Image (cartoon, helix red, strand yellow):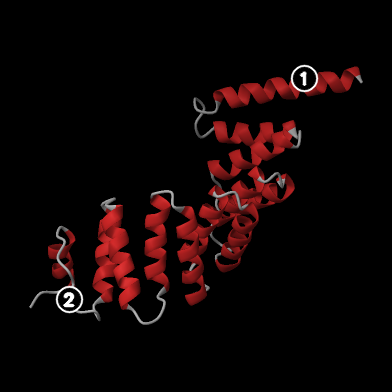
Amino acid sequence: QKTAYEMLRSLVGSEMCIRDRNEHMLYYFRGILRLYQQDFAKALKDFTQAIEYCDAAVAKYHLGRARCYACISMFKEALHDLNIALEANDTLVEAYILRGKCAFISGDTKQAFTDFQTIIRLRPDDPMMHIHAGNILMVSGAYDQSIKAYTNAYKLEPSVMALFGRAKCYVAVCMIGKALTDVAAVAKEDAEKFKTDLESLKVLHSLGKLLSLCN
């Protein structure tokens, strides 16, 4: 008798139907395998079968299909599935992350920010969640809040992403001295990559001092 894994391995490369409607999880797992193989059309078909063969909404099935839609830039369809997934399980962090990204790409920065606020509430000790929130806030023009998000991320786990993101916000609000401090710290990790940024900020910082003396 074959195990579920062996059945999947034999099914993944074929168009064979899974005859038992109660085996909707096999469609789901085959969809996952095909998704990672970047066979999005077949993965979509499998996730859809899993959804249709299941009597109630299963969050992970809709999340799987949403991932496929997102991979082929069908963000409206992805958002629809993610809404269903979160109605079924409102603590599914992966669904909030994907919905936040899809909403942001679709131009709905308000929804994206709301989702990342929820993620931070669910995972307050995860620095990447604070960085995602900082990125969205920065491009939305909420620089003060973005600086706070990057600072929180850095306190949880020092990283180049947190410092460089905060530095860009400091530049946007003309706090060149603080930006220079952050980029100088980042340059210690990768001097060549951030050489131009550091030199440019030094020039801006010197120019700012000169202008203040002239005034």
87 sits to left or right of 66: right
**How far across and how far down the image is residue 7, in percent?**
14, 69
Q: Which mark is residue 207?
A: 1
The mark nearer the N terminus, 1 or 2, is 2
Q: From the image, which quarter does the N terminus lie in?
A: bottom left
Q: Residue at x 35, y 72 (%)?
A: 51
Q: Nearer the viewer, residue 15 or 202?
A: 15
Amino acid at dot 2: Arg
| Distance between the alpha carbons at the discs numbered 1 and 2 | 73 Å
Q: Residue furthest right?
A: 215
Circle 2 is placed at which residue position?
A: 19
Q: Nearer the viewer, residue 177 or 36?
A: 36
Graded by Cα atoms within 10 Å as few (under 14), some (14 to 19) or many (20 or more), the crowding at tag 1 reads few
Q: Nearer the viewer, residue 85 or 215?
A: 85
**Image quarter of residue 208:** top right
Q: From the image, which quarter does the C terminus lie in?
A: top right
Q: Secondary structure at mark 2?
A: loop
**How far across and how far down the image is residue 214, in percent?**
89, 17
Amino acid at dot 1: Leu
166 sits to left or right of 91: right
Of circles 1 and 2, which is in front? 2
Q: Residue at x 62, y 21 (%)?
A: 199
